[in-house]
Image (cartoon, helix red, strand yellow):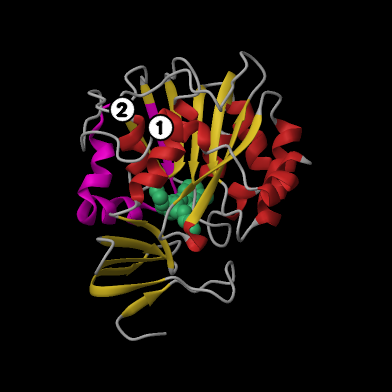
Amino acid sequence: VIPGWFSEISPMWPGEAHSLKVEKILFQGKSEYQNVMVFQSLSYGKVLVLDGVIQLTERDECAYQEMITHLPLCSIPNPKKVLVIGGGDGGVLREVSRHSSVEQIDICEIDGMVVDVSKQYFPDVAVGYEDPRVTLHIGDGVAFLKAVTEATYDAIIVDSSDPIGPAQELFEKPFFESIAKALRPGGVVCTQAESIWLHMHIIEDIVTNCHQIFKGSVNYAWTTVPTYPSGVIGFMLCSTEGPPVDFKHPVNPLDANNSHSMVNGPLKFYNSEIHSAAFCLPSFAKKVIDSK
Ligand code: AAT
């Protein structure tokens, strides 16, 4: 450990640790679920860390939040009801709010401290909560989805931390089964699905489960996020039986200067070309994912 630097050390990426130079620690606390820290970095703006793992930085959060949101929402014609699991920082809400067809946005985040800290230190991210269509539920996403007994949502976005800690069950088969039940015919899910460089075994399991559960399409996409382990992160995108969804060709494009956003002006990362490109996989990953 280098003094004055934050290093992201975890058994989930043994033998490597990305580091950022710390200018100032702004917040440190312990919630019921995890350690919460915010620091000012030299080169990536403010950084939110949970249990020693970077959740977002001001500089590159757009790459993750825009992709995890618009990959699913731009793939279906008229999303109305959207559920976000995790994502307590509000960044995904901010992105969902760009879609004018959306009428209802539910979010279920397990940790109230993440919400409070984000509102205090990351106003440009937590601004998503200002959208009047948003209802915040503090609780476990697994229990929340079990309680949804009808096919309710057009899209479910699982903006989850890694499967060590409170998010573990969000990577398991029963959780994907509750997602499928809570989605309308032709509804879509997009989940945080880790890195092709580090976690092919996790990805393999998720893909296998999803093929069994989702009768529409099952796809893996990825993007670059410099401050996430290995610099890339992926998403599992699936649709239920019903109107077919071709994730690779967005039917509901977002205008670059989208005026429906409550916030933050134009998109910084997402566009229709990068949407389609996100589904192109390196050969080593394609081989494994396509074989499932
Ligand atoms: N928006 C980018 C940051 C995240 S946040 C992941 C969120 O999931 C955290 O706020 C965490 O408290 C919440 N969470 C964890 N478990 C649950 C659960 N069971 N139910 C509801 N919310 C939960 C993603 C970071 C990705 C990191 C990649 N290394």
Q: Which mark is residue 83?
A: none
Q: Specify start and end residues of the magenta stretch as a single range.
A: 105-133
Crowding near the residue tagged with mark 1, few <14, some 14–19, many ≥20 C-alpha atoms within 10 Å: some
Where residue 121 sits, quadrant-wise, is bottom left
Q: Residue at x 45, y 26 (%)?
A: 73
**Relative to residue 170, is residue 73 drawn left or right?**
left
Crowding near the residue tagged with mark 2, few <14, some 14–19, many ≥20 C-alpha atoms within 10 Å: many
**Magenta span main SS:** helix
Q: Residue furthest right?
A: 291
Amino acid type at image mark 2: Arg
| Horizontal and vertical percent position of residue 5 | 33, 78
**Of residues 200 and 168, the one drawn nearer to the viewer in this rendering:** 200
Q: Which mark is residue 106?
A: 1
Where residue 149 sits, quadrant-wise, is top right
Mark with earlier residue (1, 2): 2
Residue that label 2 marks: 98
| Viewport quadrant of the N terminus | bottom left
Amino acid type at image mark 1: Asp
| Horizontal and vertical percent position of residue 27 | 26, 68
| Viewport quadrant of the C terminus | top right
